[in-house]
Image (tube, grey):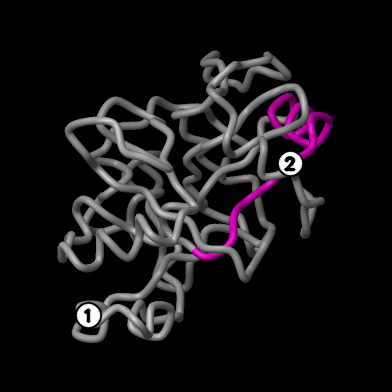
Amino acid sequence: MRTVYRSVSLSVARAAGIVVLMGICASGQQPGVGKLLVASPRVTNAQFRHAVILLIGYDAKGAAGLVLNRAGDKPLAALFPDVASAQGRSDTAYWGGPVGDKLMFCLVAASGPLREARQVLPGLYFSNNKNLMDLALNAREAGATFRVYVGYAGWTAEQIKRELNAGDWKVETATAAIVFDPAPVTLWERLTAVRVTPDGGR
């Protein structure tokens, strides 16, 4: 596992979902848009130890995803100073990954297609459009249906292939319930059934 990943073009994150197989992990599932990458216990890199990542892009150029279980330190009120309804929120954006730490993305649940957003799972959409985020905040969308992420995780084709083949990641099926899990700090533990000690160890 490398400490810092090379930046991947955001066209990967906007990909229509065409999957090019570049590696299959130990679980046997094939990675692709809408799948989870669950870090193996063997991953010791601080940024990705116990990470659960939703793939939002996967094609011949590489892969991109959002870390679902890392609380960030940037309040939504500070990220959206011009949105009045954001000023009353105490929640923070999530840390989406080490690439593009000034970029914001969102995942939002919706019953139908959204403009400026791409479907990742049935009823779950990904976007980097600020207007959509403003609208969601104005509608007072709760954390169970809308989350903001700063940065993303990115891999080149060779990086993701190498890490999958090495067993660094287990590919799992994602659901909206997992994406919007109310207790993300214990998400990895529950998905892997590995007990985590208070100091973060096993």
Front one among 195 and 5: 5
Q: Look at the image and say whether residue 12 sits in the magenta stretch.
A: no
As shown in the figure, which amino acid type bears the numbered disc 1?
Arg
Residue placed under numbered mark 1 in the picture: 89
Residue range of the region highlighted in magenta in the rendering = 150-165
Name the residue that disc number 2 marks. 155
Residue appearing at x 67%, y 44% in the figure: 10
Image location (x, y in percent) of residue 46: 64, 64
- Which class describes the residues within 10 Å of circle 2: few (<14), some (14-19), or many (20+)? many
State whether residue 110 is above or below residue 112.
Answer: below
Which label's residue is closer to the chain start, 1 or 2? 1
Q: Residue at x 46, y 61 (%)?
A: 149
Q: Residue at x 69, y 46 (%)?
A: 154
* Rendered image quadrant of residue 170: top right
Q: Amino acid at mark 2?
A: Trp
Q: Picture coordinates of residue 26 (x, y %)? A: 59, 21
Residue in front for this viewpoint, 104 or 91? 104
Classify mark 1: helix, strand or loop: loop
Q: Is residue 43 above or below residue 130?
A: above
Give percent across and percent down for residue 138.
20, 68
Residue 132 occupies which quadrant of the picture?
A: bottom left
Disc 2 is placed on an element classified as strand
Image height of 190 relative to 23, above or below: below
Q: From this view, report whether residue 86 is shown above or below residue 42.
A: below
Cα distance between the residues tagged 1 and 2? 33 Å
Q: How many marks?
A: 2
